[in-house]
Image (tube, rainbow, N blue to C red):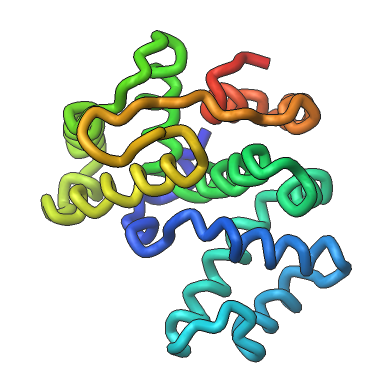
Amino acid sequence: MMKNLRYSTTIKARPLLYLEMKKAATLVVEGNILEQVKKLILEENIYQVKTESRKKEFASIVSSRLQVLDGFLMKQLVYGDVETSKLIVLYTIIKTDRLFYEFMDEVIKDKYMLRDFLLADKDFNIFFLRKREQSDVVAGWKDYTFYKLQQVFIRILFEVGILKNQKGERDINVPFLSNDVKQHLKEIGDGAFVTLLVGETV
């Protein structure tokens, strides 16, 4: 499903950014096109970041993630309940980062399906080892890169409510996703992503 995306480690510097995504989505819902939002991030520093490089990074991250949302999902991100809103941001990350997509598909989805509600370090170790065996690109990454990727994956899953804690054997929680969003994802051909987000088949 995501084979057209290259493996990348950029997610290490790109956490959930929920509030930033919601602010940008609000601007779009209010009538701005994505290019205008990008311009506001760069020229008016709407996120109050200190460096030019950080502004450019935010503009790139937010615009690339928002591009995968249609009007309905954009409005649900802005006006929906907090849990659903955060899961929509998670959906944008899954759609734009191949390694994270495969982690959700091969690890978290299996945890949901098997009702194995613990995420341990060994789950990451097995996943990353498998990716190293499957991809020359991933095989070339340093051990520290995998350590940082694990940290970021955990932080993202904790912030959206899939993980209850960030240390040791982490308890997995099934978060709430509104029925309207589930149905919409099914209608646009993304029903498989509902399974990744909340473990339900639609």
Q: Position of residue 175 (x, y in %)?
A: 56, 29
Residue 117 percent location from the top left of the image: 37, 18
Q: Residue furthest right?
A: 31
Residue drawn where x is 37% and y is 48% of the image: 155
In the image, residue 36 above or below residue 113: below
137 displayed left or right of 193: left
Residue in view at x 88 percent, y 68 percent? 31
Q: Which residue is drawn at the image coordinates 52% and 60% (left, top)?
A: 17
**Closer to us: 140 or 57:** 57
Place of residue 23 in the rendered image (x, y in percent of width and height, measured from the top left): 68, 66
Q: Residue 8 appears in which quarter of the rendering? A: bottom left
Name the image quarter holding residue 28.
bottom right
In the displayed image of the protein, which residue is found farthest to the top? Answer: 114
The answer to whether 67 is drawn above or below residue 102 in the figure is below
Quarter of the figure with residue 10 = bottom left
Q: Position of residue 53 (x, y in %)?
A: 43, 84
Residue visible at 29% across and 27% down in the picture: 119
Q: Indicate the quadrant containing the C terminus: top left, top right, bottom left or bottom right.
A: top right
